Image: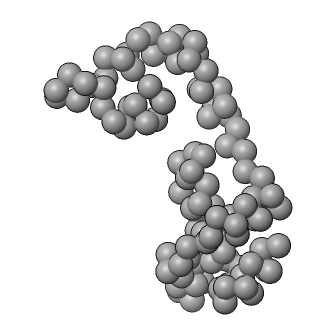
Amino acid sequence: MLIDVAQEIGRTPSQVAINWVRGQRRTCPVIPIVGAWRGAQMRDNLGCLEFSLSDEQLERLTAASPFNPGFPHSFLRYPHLKQLIYSGALERMSSRSGAVSPLVRSKWRM
């Protein structure tokens, strides 16, 4: 599947794979770790920033290799556990105006 998508859009499989990992930020913040040993590999890998995968391509790649963020992401999504861990501190984390910061709100879906 990866090679098929790469050939369709004229990109290397590594560029498509890294771009797919970047596309997972819709479900979980993910930063791909690039393991290039040579300058040519790094330049190739950075080519993933020059294009975007379509929703259809992302779905095809995800179906071929579903992404599951696992622990601790799955553990921390339960409200009662957040309360137990933070003892209400999340509600007190606020911006200077006293409102809950957008970062905290989006991170914990408040």
Q: Please give left or right for residue 103 compared with residue 81 in the image.
A: left
The quadrant of the image that shows the N terminus is bottom right
Q: Is residue 37 visible?
A: no
The answer to whether 106 is drawn above or below residue 65 in the figure is above
Taking the spot 61% from the left edge, 55% from the top edge, the residue there is 24
Q: Is residue 53 visible?
A: yes
Q: How is the image coloured?
A: one colour
- Residue 42, horizontal then vertical, whole percent: 54, 80
Q: Please give left or right for residue 80 compared with residue 110 in the image.
A: right
Taking the spot 48% from the left edge, 30% from the top edge, the residue there is 109
Q: Please give left or right for residue 62 compared with residue 43 in the image.
A: right
- Residue 29, horizontal then vertical, whole percent: 53, 48
- Residue 3, horizontal then vertical, whole percent: 79, 80
- Which quadrant holds residue 53? bottom right
The answer to whether 87 is drawn above or below residue 9 in the figure is above
- Residue 86, horizontal then vertical, whole percent: 45, 16
- Closer to us: 71 or 106: 106
- Closer to us: 42 or 73: 73
Which residue extends farthest left?
Answer: 97
Taking the spot 44% from the left edge, 25% from the top edge, the residue there is 110
Taking the spot 41% from the left edge, 11% from the top edge, the residue there is 88
Count of marks overlaid on the render = 0
- Closer to us: 51 or 29: 51
